[in-house]
Image (tube, coloured by chain):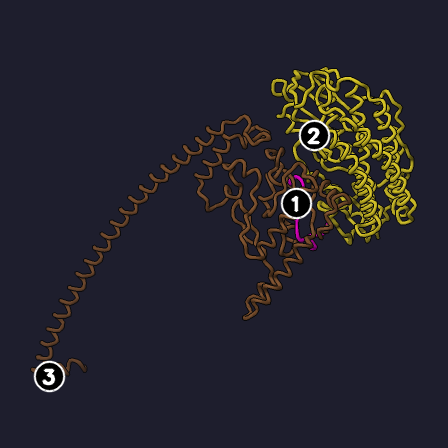
Amino acid sequence: MAVDGKNDSLTYTNPAMDLMARLPGVDIFTSTVDRLLTWGSSNSLWMFPMATSCCGIEFMASATARVDIDRMGTIVRGSPRQGDVMVVAGTITVKMAPRVKKLWDQMPEPKWCVAMGSCAISGDFYRDIYSVIPGIDTVVPVDIYVPGCPPNPEQLMAGLMRLQEKMRAQQRGEWTEPEIRPETEKMNTQPDIRRLLDDERDEGISQAQYDGSCSLGMHGNEHRRHDQVGNPVGVDREQGVEALILRAQAHAQAMEALRQEAAQEFAAAQAAKEAKAKAAAEAKAAAAAKAAAEAEAAAADDDASVAGDAADEAPAGDGETP
Amino acid sequence: MSLSIQPYSAEQPVNPYLDVDLYDPDADLMVLNLGPQHPSTHGVFRVKLILDGEVIVKAIGYPGYLHRGVEKLCEKLNYSNIKAIIDKNDYISPMINEQAVNMAFEKLAGVEVPRRALWLRSLLAEFQRIASHLIALGTFGLDVGGALGGGASAFMYCFRDREMILDVFEELSGCRFHYNTHCVGGNRHDVPAGWDRMVLPALEVIEARLDELVDMMVNNQVFVDRTQGVGVIPKNLALGLGLTGPNGRASGIDCDLRRDAPYNAYGEVEVRPAVRSAGDCQARFLCRVDEIRESARLARLFLAGLPEGPISGTKPNKGPTSVKIKEGRCYVGLSTPRGELGTYLIAGGNKGLSPYRLKIRPPSLHHLASIPYILPGNNLSDAIAILGSLDPVMGEADR
C-alpha cells in the first residue's frame, strides 16, 4: 500500500501471493492464480458501511430492491472483519474520526475505501466548522471518490465499477490514474492538510501556501467557495495567486540570505580549523625535530659511553652492580 | 448479594443514576459498548450498557458523534442558504425540516403565502411522512428480524415502496433528497402536468402493500414476542421527558400539532392522529402504520382540493431570494414524522441578512433521553428492538 501525498494510490497486494512469488519457478502458476483471485475479489466486493448521515440512507437504498447492488456481488456486512471495501457515507466529525481509523485498521488486507458524498470527500458545508473533518482522506487513504449530496445509488454503483476496473488493471500490471479529490481538481492551490503537517516539509512554503489559500477565501467566512460551474465566489483569485507568488519569492530571498550567511560561517570555521591544524602540524614537526635532536645527542652519549666502557670497564661494572 | 432490576413501570420506576458499586459490590458486571458504529443504532449513537448476565442494569447514552455545528453555521449564512443546511438535519424527512425554518422566516418577515403554496406544502409534508415512516418500519424489521432472518424482507418491501415517493419528489423538484423547494413567500416548483397520474397509483400501491406488511409482522409470533410489552414508556414518563410524535402518541399523549395548532393547510381539513395506550414497541410500530394510512388519506384530500393560483407571493422565483429581517424573535412548532420540531429564531445578525441565533428543538434528542429509563431491566437483545422502535435520527439529535 503506497500513500503518496494527496494522490493516494493503493496497489493491490496479496500476502499469500507475495509469499509464493518468492519460490523459484512458480511465476506462471502465480500469475494465473493472481488473475483468478482478482477476478474473484473484484466480483465479490463486500462492503463495510461507515454510514453516519444522509448518504447512509442512499447507501441503504442502493442495497435494496430498486438498484439492488447485490447483483454485483457486493454484499453489505456490518463487521469490519468481513469487509473488503469501506464505504464512508456521511460527515465524519472529530469525535468519530478515531473510530473510523480504528475500524479501517481492523479490516483485513486487501482493502479499499470509497468516499461517498461531499461531506466524506471534503466536508462540504461543514468544512469550516470546528467539529468536522475536512475530508476522510485526511484519515484513511481513499481509492474512489463518489461526488454528490447525496449521490444517487446509481452513482455509487458506478464508483464501485470504477474500483473493479482499477483492480483488474492493476492485476494486469497497467498504470492506473489515481483519483483526485474532486474539489482539489477545481482549486489546485488548496493546501493539503497532511502536507502542511509534514515535519520534513519546509515551514515557510507551507505558510505561504496557506496564506495564499486564505486570500482565496478557503478558510474565511465564505460558506461556498465556488458556485455550481466552479468559479470562486466573493474572492479575488488573481490577488490570491499574486500573494502566493510574493510570499514564495520573499521566502526564497530569505532562504538565500540564510544560505549565504551559513556559507560565510562555514568558510570562517574552515579557515579557523585549517589554521589550527597547521599550528598543530608545526608543533608536531617541532617536537619531532626536537626528539630527533635528542636521539642524536643520546646516540652520541652512547658512543661516548661505549668508548668509556672500553676505556675503564672495572669502575663501570662496579657502578652497575653495587 | 445483588438486587434485581425490573423494567420501568409506574409503580417501580428505574433509577437511571444507579450506583453500580452499590448494586454489585463484587464488581462482577460487564460493560458493553453498543455503537457508535453499529447498524442497529440508526446512525452514530453510542450506548454504554452495564450488564448483569444478559440483563441490562444501567444504560448511558453518548450522543455527539455527528455534531456538525449547524446552529453556529446558520449564524453566518443568509436566510436563503439556511434551508439547504436544515435539509440535512433530519435527513429522513428533509421536506418538513426546510418548511420549519421557512415558516419562521415568513413569520418574522411578515410575508403572505398564497393558498396554493400552503396546500402544496401540506401535500408534500404528508408524502414525506409516508416515506419517513416506511424507513422506520423497514429498519425496525431489520433490527428485530436480523439481517439474514425474516426482517430483511420487510426492509426490502418498505424501501421498494419508498422509492415511489422519491420518484414523485424527483418529478417535482429534480432531487431524490435535499429538495430545497421552499422559499420565503412560496414554493419554487409548481406541480408538473400529469403529476396526479403518478401520485394516486403510488398511494394506492403503498396502502395495499401496507396491509401485507402488517400481516407479515404483527401476525408473526416471533415479532409479537419481541415487541409486545417490551420497552414500555408510561404516560407520565413520556410527559416528563417531552416525548412527541408517534412515540408520545403510543404512550397515550393525544397531541398532534397538525390538529392542535394548525399550520399550512391543516386547519382546513380534519386530522385524526393515531393514539394508543400500551406504550411498548409494538404500539409505536402500529402508531406509525396508522399514521401512514392517515397521511395517505390526507394526501388524497390535499391533492383533490389543491387550489388554483400562483404558488409564490412575489414574482415567480426560480432561484433563492434574499430576505432581510431587521429584528424580532419567534417560535415555530411543526409536526415532523418524529415529533414536534421547534425552531426558535432571533433575527438581527449580519445587518439583518442572517439570524442572530437559531435554536432547533429536535424531537429525536428527547426520545433518546428515555434510553436510561427504559433499557434497564430488559435483555440485551431487547435493547436493539427498543432503539429501533424509537426511530431516532442522529443528524437532528446532534445537529
Q: Kindly tell me whether residue A77 is visible in this rendering.
A: no
Q: Chain B is drawn in which colour?
A: yellow
Q: Nearer the viewer, residue A84 or B375?
A: A84
Where A45 sits versus B209, above or below?
below
**Distance in Å between CA atoms under marks 3 and 2:** 122 Å
Foreground disc of the pair 1, 3: 1
Q: Which amino acid does label 3 sit on?
A: Glu
Res. B86 mark: 2
Which numbered disc flags the more N-terminal residue, 1 or 3?
A: 1
Residue B104 part of the magenta segment: no
Taking the spot 15% from the left edge, 67% from the top edge, the residue there is A292
Q: What residue type is labelled 1?
A: Ala
Q: Where is residue B96 in the image (x, y as percent from the top left)?
A: 76, 29
Q: Colour of chain A?
A: brown
**Distance in Å between CA atoms under marks 1 and 2:** 29 Å
Q: What element carries label 3?
A: helix
Labels 3 and 2 in the same subunit:
no
Stretch of the chain drawn in magenta: A76-92
Residue position marked by numbered label 3 in the rendering: A313
Residue position marked by numbered label 1 in the rendering: A158
Q: Is mark 2 on a helix, strand or loop?
A: helix
Q: What element carries label 1?
A: helix
